[in-house]
Image (cartoon, grey):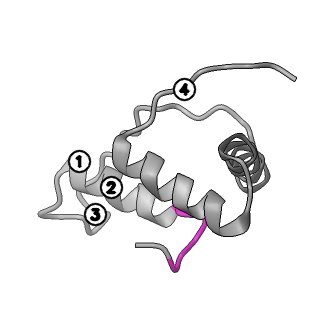
Amino acid sequence: MVKTQIQVPEELYRDVKSFANAREWSLAETFRRGAELLLEVYDGSPKDSHWVPPVSAKVGWKGLSPAQLRELAFQDANPNPAAP
């Protein structure tokens, strides 16, 4: 087992801590399970972190900025469609 230190936003910490307490898990166990879930859900192949939409006048995205298209693309990649 490797010991490490992470930083998370306070709100996320509170939410994860509450989640862990409700299940009688340690905070470390909760983060381990979360990491395992990420590895199961995502294929693990490296992705280019800077997504650029295709350039075409005929794709039907008129009026959307590249940032808006990027946000929509990441929404489509959400592994939990019920999540906001």
- Residue 46 position within the rendered picture, expressed as x and y whole percent measured from the top left: 65, 31
Is residue 18 shown above or below 51?
below
State if disc 4 and disc 1 touch (CB < 8 Å). no
Q: What's drawn in magenta, residue-wise?
A: 77-82
Q: Which residue is mark 2?
A: 71
Element at badge 1? helix
Asked if the residue under mark 3 is in contact with the one under mark 2, i.e. CB atoms within 8 Å, the reply is no
- Residue 58 has which mark? 3
Mark with earlier residue (3, 1): 3
* In contact (CB < 8 Å): disc 1 and disc 2: yes
Q: CA distance from mark 2 to mark 3?
A: 20 Å
Residue kind at label 3, given as amino acid type? Lys
Mark found first going from the N terminus, 2 or 4: 4
Q: Residue at x 43, y 63 (%)?
A: 75
Question: Which is more toward the observer, 39 or 16?
Answer: 16
Which residue lies under the disc numbered 4? 6
Label 1 packing within 10 angstroms: few (<14), some (14-19), many (20+): few
Tell me if I can see residue 25 in this picture: yes
Q: Residues within 10 Å of mark 2 (few under 14, many from 20)?
A: few
Indicate left or right for 61 with 81 as reference. Answer: left
Q: CA distance from mark 1 to mark 2?
A: 6 Å
Give the Cα distance between marks 3 and 1: 19 Å
As for residue 73 lying within the magenta part, the answer is no
Q: Amino acid at mark 1?
A: Ala
Label 1 belongs to which residue? Answer: 67
N-terminal of the pair, mark 2 or mark 3, is 3
Callout 4 crowding tier (Cα within 10 Å): few <14, some 14–19, many ≥20 = few
Q: Earlier in the sequence, mark 1 or mark 4?
A: 4
